[in-house]
Amino acid sequence: MKQLKPLIIVTTLFLFTSGLVFSQSTLDCSLCHSDKNNLWITSQHSNTQNDVAEELAGEWAGLPADSVINGSASENCIACHGAAAVSANGGMTEVQALNYFFSTTDGNFTDTTSALKTDEWPHVACVTCHNVPEVHPGTPPEIEIFNSSDAQYHAVENVSVLCGQCHGSLRFKDTDHLRMDAWLLSKHGHGGQSDVAGELAEEWAGNTPDDVINGEEAENCIACHAPTSVMLNGGISESEALNMFFTTTDGKFTSETTVQNTSDWPEVGCNVCHNPHKPEDISLYNSTTAQYESMSSAQELCGQCHGNLRFPDTDHLSYNIESGTGGMGVADEITMPNVKCVNCHMAGGEEDTRAAMFAGHSWSAFVQEEDGSTTAACTSCHSDMDANAAMTKIEELQAEFANLDSVANEKVAVAENIISGSTDSTLIKKYQEAEFNLLYAEGDESGGVHNHKYTASLLNDAIDKATEIITGVDNNTNIIPKEFKLYQNYPNPFNPTTKIKFEIPRKSNVTITVFDALGRKISQLMNTEKAPGIYDVEFDASKYSSGVFFYKLSAGDFVQVRKMVLLR
């Protein structure tokens, strides 16, 4: 934390031209910043006095201002709802400011307490978050928080930390406003820089930052992982931001690229989705244009980065999957009609729970409460289940998706091998649709939860089309595989029979052996010499009970083992 900077006293502020009075000073920011001022005028930050009056009348009736500010269960209303109020009336303490701006009877607040001197109340004005220097406009303001307790400006590391003074527990540990605390727990609040570094090292080695942002196959990492980074150093481009935050050699990323300047990395901070001058509006900061763009809904906002609304070629497609459209040869379908991103990922909770205090800013459907219990977003609609049942159901959906995904990947891989070099347009089209639907389903990063019926349809379609290609070939042994491979059995789990497919690239003696969960050999499905090709063999488990089994392919020096599940 930087050293505290002294408060710019009221007499200094009087040096500025006066206009409409919205704070303790005569600063009229609207003269030069009318666009931002016009947003602020219509925001909740510009209308805070009545909220404080209602709080005082509702929870502090019968108590004096000193109890509100300094009592054992104090709630310092001034600090976050009108910090600059202490600069009014020639300068006051927070206790004096409460008495000055809100009515009392015999020194105590009552159930009829109301706002006073409303024309002097500062609300959360410009000077609350901007330390304006004496030489302004020659020197821009610092992003700092005005502390009403000591009447000084305090430096902050970034905008999110600024917001966290009142929308988190950074300043008041016992607050029930915990949005920043929730954000810090989320992927939006940590880990993004390392994720980008891994992507750059793995996929962009040998390329420049400009290639990543503007090249033919560009992936604009900055736009979704840290768009406000372009605000740094007086304003930089997205390419310059990549160069600032990730190591290069001779101007290019390498397989050793890693993070740098981590203390300045902003993550997906508050001011990505909240225009600070009117934070309740649904907005997105566009790092390419360096402007805020208004969104019609929270769903549209999420779809900018968790869907293809902004980047058509992205593989982050949760938004699209939830909409239940876009598959090739698959009917549109929505598993949970009228359920949007925020219903599950920004759900609240009962009063005084962490789920309520987080206000959805962990973006998790499950919130751990202080008493060890869990609040689950699912239960707001599914009242017949508790959090444990909800988690179990989600795990079941994800397991089903994972199984289908495994089968689809293996069948599509076989189909790809079969059509390699083919000029049959029908087969090629069928393969392209199978591959598209497989990749589209995998673009849903919930493991099939967002729209389970639709992702299952996509994967089943990929399996069916790939299977048609495989079974449509008259003689699989005429296909020469490139490598030995043992596929996951299908179906899996199974009852009582399942197919085991494998590939061998050269003439080999092949054995397929099945073992029980204890490693005991229970069946040998094949032990013979095979020419290069693609084969399958059936395992019939009619005489066995439900359980886990293992099957092993041995061919020459190649050995591979996989697990399968008999489920009766």
Image (cartoon, rainbow, N blue to C red):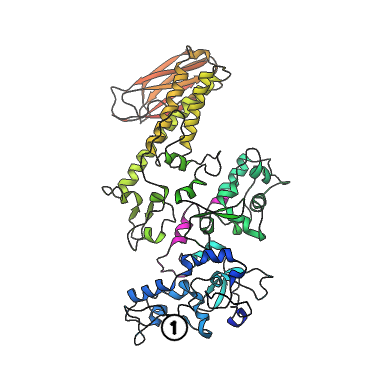
Was residue 391 drawn as part of the magenta stretch in this picture? Answer: no
- On the picture, is 96 further left or further right than 369? right
Please identify the dominant SS of the magenta region: loop
- On the picture, is 528 further left or further right than 244? left
**Which of 546/454 is in front?**
454
Residue occupying image coordinates x 67% and y 46%? 209
Residue occupying image coordinates x 50% and y 53%? 188
Q: Residue furthest bottom?
A: 106
User: Up-down: is 111 above or below 358?
Assistant: below
Badge 1 marks a residue whose secondary structure is: helix
Q: Residue furthest right?
A: 250
**Which of 108/14 is in front?**
14
- Check the picture and name the quadrant holding the C terminus: top left
**Which of 561/344 is in front?**
344
* Image location of residue 243, percent across then percent down: 67, 50
Can you tell which quarter of the image residue 16 is in?
bottom right
Instruction: Say whether residue 556 is visible.
Output: no
User: Up-down: is 345 above or below 172?
Assistant: above
Q: Report the amino acid beneath label 1.
A: Tyr
* Image location of residue 490, percent across then percent down: 39, 25
Can you tell which quarter of the image residue 76 is in?
bottom left
* Image location of residue 550, percent across then percent down: 39, 28
Span colored in magenta: 168-194
Residue on which disc 1 sits: 100
User: Up-down: is 236 above or below 109?
Assistant: above
* Image location of residue 83, percent across then percent down: 49, 75
